[in-house]
């Protein structure tokens, strides 16, 4: 039924389309920006576009997830993919302007009155929801294969001694009688002790009413004190003086939301399936009823075109090929003058010969003027233009269809939100026309050849020969990959990789479990001239943009800037492996572990390693999306391998990995992810060739450490009270990683310590003692990592950019000083 919720999301869609219309109008403006080639001003413009597109993406994704009408969802899906691709293009443009993967937009947040949470990139829920059945089947198959690898228990150990029913009953009776005897003896002994205590102490038995009153007083006092304590805690939480205790159990409201979401997904799938069935039926009807009429009309139009060309030029034209569009490029509403301009060459027209000479003279004069002015064009303020986009035409087309079809549509009577038959007919009629056009083109090409033979056989033969020769010259040789397993199925290769331990099951880690706070000092530090360290929040946003969105959407991966390999660098325990597993969980990707330790002695020799790479990439491309993980990536690119690691042979990927990257094309959602705690031990150039994008995984700052302590303690079952000083923990844990914080929390919060929390609350000293036992990240390691990042291609660009800006500032200051000195002399 067209409920209030559907109406609400229709309004949200309308608001998103209004803001999208403003953005499209600004993007289609061909005039350069007023700021010229000022890098900071141009970055501010691109970042503003990015923030606005991000808000639109959040609204469109929410509408796509909530609406039920299948045709609306198709349009929303196209818009969502287009906006996601545009975000990636803007991110790439910001990278070109700033020469860094991380950027800070505090001033833009102030302008739009947004919070840092508004910069969080939402992960589209359709990535998992639309592949739920496939992922569940794959998970069952993988778990079954992994269960077969577990060590079996010895059958002799599991054997039980056989026993008859009478013997078993007799054994149970003996045990029960012994238990009852012990119980009766204990009761008699307790009664005797009580009597002896009363006689020795002289205790007088109390009246039952008086005893009950005393018990009631104690119990009522205890209840009242507990009630007052709860009221005090609520008051402190309300005032913001104490953080609330996080509940591990789900509320009933959350459970209701999950059930409603599951029901909505079922309704969406059912409606889409009905739409597919109806589209096929309508297409068959159009073919049967209108197919012959469409075919005859096309043939008549093409024959008329033959006749008009013969009348104008005295010869039959060349028929367009399939790549040029076939007869679709011919049949258009054109006047006779337009046809003459297309068919008659300008060299034969005497009127145009004189015009050509005049135009050539004008063009040469204009070129001379432009060449003279090109030297000072940048300084005069020609301006900077936004580069062309691959996704903007899709966005504009989707916005146009929304305005034409859905904007002013009244759906109050569409109770069940089913599909619209008229819209299906329009779409399917175009598909039928395109299919019939292919058949008509083949027939009319043969008819044209026959007409040319009748008119002039020799010229017709010469033209056909020339065409064949041109087509041969245009062909290019492409490098093909050799298939080493042509006779094996993908299922058998999949099972082999699982049994060998190469294809592993990712841990259940999602991005919601990864904690990181926004860096509030990034823009302020950049203004002072210091390079700010990115926060964990910034890292998570970059991984979502560059990895999860392309892996989750085939259309985005095909047209967006291609990222085939990624390198995560940072000290141990900072969360690199957790990021890899979170990527696989959020996209439903297969995880292939090609670390040197994991594949030791599994595929020996060069032939075996070549076969391993072939198997991994063949299965990865057939079962997309896929992530190929290489831990300790620096070992592959070391100058000398240590003696301890020669058995692992870590350098076997040095030559094979770049070759396999060349076969990964746009649209093939395969990503190679390397993790390295010490990348400065490797040679820079070959490592940067293998990994196209490098992201630094930083240590947590104060805000992130505070959030990590609070989250880990609450998840472990600890209670945060005023006795636990989290601020001191956040300060004292500077230099430690999230892995260190997790280890300290696990060491302190044992089962016994959790039981003692009511009488002995948690104190910061307990966690600090455990932290002192661990080795924190030294300042030298940080400096080595920073120096190595500056040697990467992007780091070199960044250093050169900052040096050029400093030189320009110094020159401007010298000019100002010289001007002031001249004025004083005058």
Image (spheres, rainbow, N blue to C red):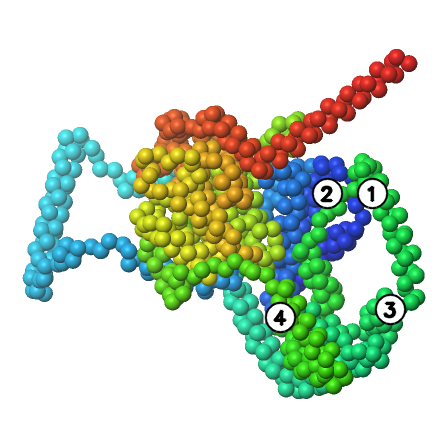
Q: Report the residue that reaches farthest toward the top.
A: 825
Find disc 3 in the rendering and name its residue.
Answer: 348
Q: How far is the residue under mark 4 from the one under mark 1?
A: 62 Å
Question: Of label 1 and label 3, which has the lower sequence position?
Answer: 3
Q: Which residue matches tag 2?
A: 45
Residue at 84%, 15% (x, y): give it.
Answer: 821
Q: Which mark lies nearer to you, 4 or 2?
A: 2
Tag shown at residue 371: 1
Q: Residue at x 64, y 83 (%)?
A: 287
Q: Earlier in the sequence, mark 4 or mark 2?
A: 2
Quadrant containing the C terminus in the rendered view: top right
Instruction: Examine the rendering and report whether any part of residue 633 can be seen.
Output: yes
First in residue order: circle 3 vs circle 2: 2
Earlier sequence position, callout 4 versus callout 3: 3
Element type at marker 3?
Answer: loop
**Residue drawn at point x = 10 percent, y = 54 percent:** 175
Cα–Cα span, label 4 and label 3: 61 Å
Gap in Å between the C-alphas at discs 1 and 2? 29 Å
Q: Nearer the viewer, residue 507 or 669?
A: 669
Which mark, residue 266? none
Q: Secondary structure at mark 4?
A: loop
The residue identified by callout 4 is: 417
Q: Is residue 341 left or right of residue 558?
A: right
């Amino acid at each position: 039924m067209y409920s209030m919720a559907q109406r609400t999301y229709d309004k949200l869609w309308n608001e998103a389309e209004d803001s999208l219309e403003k953005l499209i109008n600004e993007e289609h403006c061909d005039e350069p920006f007023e700021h010229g080639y000022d890098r900071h001003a141009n970055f501010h413009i691109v970042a503003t576009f990015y923030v606005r597109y991000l808000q639109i993406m959040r609204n469109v994704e929410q509408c796509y997830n909530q609406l039920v009408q299948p045709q609306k969802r198709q349009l929303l899906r196209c818009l969502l993919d287009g906006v996601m691709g545009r975000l990636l293009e803007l991110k790439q443009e910001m990278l070109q302007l700033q020469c860094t993967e991380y950027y800070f937009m505090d001033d833009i947040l102030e302008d739009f009155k947004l919070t840092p949470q508004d910069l969080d990139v939402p992960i589209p829920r359709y990535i998992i929801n639309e592949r739920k059945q496939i992922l569940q089947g794959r998970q069952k198959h993988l778990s079954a294969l992994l269960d077969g690898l577990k060590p079996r228990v010895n059958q002799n150990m599991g054997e039980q001694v056989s026993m008859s029913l009478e013997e078993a009953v007799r054994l149970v009776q003996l045990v029960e009688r012994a238990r009852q005897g012990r119980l009766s003896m204990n009761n008699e002994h307790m009664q005797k002790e009580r009597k002896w205590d009363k006689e020795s102490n002289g205790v007088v038995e109390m009246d039952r009413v008086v005893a009950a009153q005393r018990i009631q007083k104690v119990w009522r006092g205890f209840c009242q004190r507990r009630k007052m304590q709860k009221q005090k805690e609520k008051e402190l939480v309300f005032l913001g003086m104490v953080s609330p205790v996080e509940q591990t159990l789900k509320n009933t409201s959350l459970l209701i939301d999950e059930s409603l979401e599951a029901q909505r997904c079922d309704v969406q799938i059912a409606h889409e399936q009905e739409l597919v069935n109806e589209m096929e039926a309508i297409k068959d009807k159009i073919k049967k009823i209108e197919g012959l009429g469409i075919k005859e009309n096309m043939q008549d139009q093409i024959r008329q075109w033959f006749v008009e060309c013969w009348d104008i030029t005295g010869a039959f034209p060349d028929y367009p090929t399939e790549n040029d569009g076939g007869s679709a490029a011919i049949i258009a509403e054109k006047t006779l003058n337009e046809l003459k301009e297309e068919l008659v060459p300008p060299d034969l027209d005497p009127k145009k010969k004189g015009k050509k000479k005049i135009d050539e003279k004008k063009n040469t004069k204009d070129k001379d003027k432009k060449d003279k002015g090109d030297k000072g064009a940048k300084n005069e303020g020609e301006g900077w233009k936004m580069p062309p986009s691959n996704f903007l035409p899709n966005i504009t087309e989707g916005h146009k269809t929304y305005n034409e079809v859905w904007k002013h549509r009244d759906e109050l009577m569409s109770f069940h939100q089913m599909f619209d038959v008229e819209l299906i007919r329009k779409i399917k009629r175009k598909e039928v026309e395109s299919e019939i056009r292919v058949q008509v083109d083949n027939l009319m090409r043969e008819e044209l050849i026959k007409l040319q033979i009748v008119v002039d056989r020799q010229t017709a033969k010469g033209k056909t020969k020339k065409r064949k020769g041109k087509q041969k010259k245009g062909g290019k040789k492409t490098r093909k990959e050799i298939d080493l397993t042509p006779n094996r199925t993908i299922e058998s290769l999949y099972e082999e990789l699982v049994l060998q331990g190469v294809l592993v099951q990712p841990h259940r880690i999602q991005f919601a479990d990864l904690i990181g706070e926004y860096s509030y000092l990034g823009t302020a530090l950049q203004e002072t001239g210091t390079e700010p360290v990115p926060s964990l929040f910034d890292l998570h946003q970059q991984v979502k943009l560059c990895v999860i969105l392309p892996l989750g959407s085939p259309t985005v991966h095909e047209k967006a800037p291609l990222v085939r390999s990624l390198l995560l660098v940072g000290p141990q325990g900072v969360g690199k492996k957790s990021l890899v597993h979170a990527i696989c969980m959020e996209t439903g990707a297969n995880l292939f572990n090609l670390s040197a330790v994991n594949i030791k002695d599994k595929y020996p020799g060069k032939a075996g390693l070549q076969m391993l790479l072939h198997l991994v990439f063949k299965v990865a491309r057939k079962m997309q999306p896929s992530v190929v993980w290489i831990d300790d990536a620096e070992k592959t690119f070391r100058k000398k391998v240590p003696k301890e690691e020669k058995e692992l042979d870590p350098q076997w990927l040095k030559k094979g990995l770049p070759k396999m990257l060349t076969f990964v094309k746009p649209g093939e959602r395969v990503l190679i992810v390397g993790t390295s705690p010490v990348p400065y031990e490797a040679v820079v150039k070959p490592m940067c060739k293998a990994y196209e994008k490098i992201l630094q995984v930083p240590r947590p700052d104060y805000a992130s450490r505070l959030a990590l302590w609070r989250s880990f303690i609450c998840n472990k079952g600890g209670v945060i009270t005023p006795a636990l000083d989290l601020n001191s923990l956040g300060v004292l844990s500077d230099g430690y990683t999230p892995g260190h914080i997790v280890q300290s929390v696990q060491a302190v919060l044992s089962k016994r310590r959790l039981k003692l929390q009511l009488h002995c609350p948690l104190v910061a000293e307990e966690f600090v003692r455990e932290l002192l036992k661990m080795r924190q990240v030294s300042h030298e390691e940080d400096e080595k990592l920073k120096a190595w990042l500056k040697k990467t291609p992007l780091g070199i660009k960044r250093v050169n950019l900052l040096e050029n800006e400093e030189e320009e500032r110094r020159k401007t200051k010298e000019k100002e000083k010289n001007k002031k000195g001249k004025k004083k002399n005058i």
